[in-house]
C-alpha cells in the first residue's frame, strides 16, 4: 500500500522497501536492474533489450550538447553484467531502434553497431534484431554480419515487437514484450530538484497474459515521463487500448542495481497530484 508524503522524493525512499536486487521474477520471465528482460524456453535462454539508439552521442554533439563518448562502453558493460546473471549461452534480442538517426547510417552509428554486434557474436550464442522505426538503414549492415532484420519474433509463450506499428491484441495469445516508448518517471523534491528513473510498465490481463514495456537500454536516451502525460499521448496502440493508468511501474535504481515497485500509474499519479495541491 502506497502512503501519502509531503514530497515526491519520499515516495522513492519509502519504495526502497519494495525492492529487488538485480532481478525480479514473474511467472514466465524476469526483469532486471539493467533494463533487460530474461526468459527461458526449452533450455534456450533469451535476453531482450530495446532502444539502444547507437549514435545518439554524435547527434547530441552536433546539436551543441557535449557529452563523453561512453554509450557503447556502457552497453557492453551492462551486457557483460547480465552474462554474470544468466551465462553466455544465451540469445540476445535487439527489440528495435538499434540506431538513433531516422535518416541514413552515420559513421558513428555504423562503427558502434559493428562493434556491438561483433562483441555479442564473439561471446554469446546468437543475436536477433527486430526492426524499430529508426532502423531503415541498418538492413545491409546487419545482413553482412549474417543477421536478418525482422518485424517481430515469437516463441511458444512470447511475442516480441518494437511497438511503433499497430498490433492486434486479440490475435496475440502470448506474453507481449514491446519497447519504443522509453517509459520513465520523474520525482521532484521540495526545492524543485528532480530525478528521472527509467522503468518497466507491466500489465497482467484476465487471460493471465503479461504485456511488458521495456525501458530504453541507452543511458542517454531520454525517458518519457508517464506520470505527466495522458493515455492519448502514448504512441503504442495496445498501451492505449489497455489504458496507461492500468500498468504497474517497476523503476530501475541503476546506482544500487535495484528494481523498485511504484504501484499502478493511476495510483502514483493520484499521490503526486495530492502532494502538489
Image: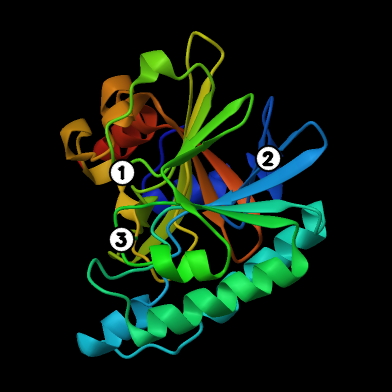
Q: Is residue 1 visible?
A: no
Residue at 48% over, 46% down? 214
Q: Which residue is mark 1?
A: 226
* Nearest to N terminus: mark 3 or mark 2: 2
Which SS class for mark 3?
Answer: loop
Q: Are marks 3 and 2 in contact (CB under 8 Å)?
A: no
Q: CA distance from mark 2 to mark 1?
A: 21 Å
Between label 3 and label 2, give the one nearer the viewer. Answer: 3
Query: Who's the residue at 33% across and 47% down the image?
Result: 181
Answer with left or right where residue 229 lies relative to residue 113.
left
Callout 1: helix, strand or loop?
helix
Residue 59, placed above or below residue 207: below
Give the Cα separation between the discs numbered 3 and 2.
34 Å
Considering every residue shown, the one lying at the far left of the view is 232
- Give the residue drawn at x 37%, y 19%: 169
Q: Earlier in the sequence, mark 1 or mark 3?
A: 3
Rendered location of residue 37, percent (x, y): 61, 45
State the residue in front, 181 or 18. 181
Residue 50, position as x, y percentages in the image: 47, 53
Q: Which element type, helix, strand or loop, lies under badge 2?
A: strand
Disc nearest the viewer among 1 and 3: 3
Name the N-terminal-most of marks 2 and 1: 2
Q: 160 or 32: nearer the eye?
A: 160
Looking at the image, is 83 positioned above or below residue 132?
below
Report the disc number at residue 24: 2
> What residue would you read off at disc 3?
136
Amino acid at each position: 500500500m502506497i502512503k501519502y508524503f509531503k514530497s515526491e522524493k519520499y515516495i522513492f525512499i519509502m519504495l526502497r522497501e519494495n525492492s529487488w536486487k538485480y532481478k525480479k521474477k514473474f511467472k514466465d520471465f524476469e526483469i532486471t536492474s539493467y533494463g533487460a528482460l530474461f526468459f527461458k524456453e526449452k533450455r534456450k535462454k533469451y535476453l531482450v533489450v530495446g532502444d539502444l539508439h547507437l549514435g545518439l552521442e554524435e547527434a547530441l554533439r552536433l546539436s551543441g550538447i557535449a557529452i563523453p563518448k561512453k554509450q557503447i562502453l556502457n552497453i557492453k558493460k551492462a551486457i557483460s553484467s547480465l552474462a554474470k546473471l544468466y551465462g553466455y549461452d544465451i540469445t540476445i534480442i535487439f527489440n528495435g531502434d538499434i540506431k538513433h538517426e531516422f535518416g541514413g547510417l552515420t559513421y558513428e552509428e555504423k562503427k558502434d553497431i559493428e562493434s556491438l554486434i561483433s562483441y555479442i557474436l564473439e561471446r554469446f550464442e546468437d543475436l536477433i534484431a527486430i526492426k524499430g522505426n529508426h532502423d531503415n538503414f541498418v538492413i545491409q549492415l546487419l545482413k553482412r554480419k549474417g543477421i536478418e532484420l525482422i518485424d517481430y519474433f515469437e516463441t511458444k509463450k512470447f511475442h516480441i515487437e518494437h511497438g511503433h506499428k499497430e498490433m492486434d491484441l486479440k490475435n496475440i495469445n502470448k506474453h507481449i514484450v514491446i519497447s519504443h516508448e522509453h517509459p520513465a518517471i520523474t520525482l521532484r523534491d521540495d526545492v524543485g530538484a528532480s530525478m528521472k528513473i527509467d522503468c518497466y510498465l507491466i500489465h497482467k490481463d484476465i487471460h493471465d497474459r503479461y504485456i511488458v514495456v521495456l525501458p530504453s537500454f541507452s543511458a542517454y536516451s531520454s525517458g518519457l515521463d508517464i506520470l505527466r502525460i495522458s493515455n492519448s499521448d502514448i504512441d503504442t496502440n495496445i498501451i492505449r487500448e489497455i489504458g496507461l493508468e492500468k500498468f504497474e511501474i517497476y523503476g530501475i535504481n541503476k546506482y544500487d542495481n535495484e528494481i523498485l515497485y511504484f504501484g499502478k500509474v493511476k495510483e502514483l499519479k493520484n499521490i503526486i497530484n495530492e502532494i502538489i495541491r
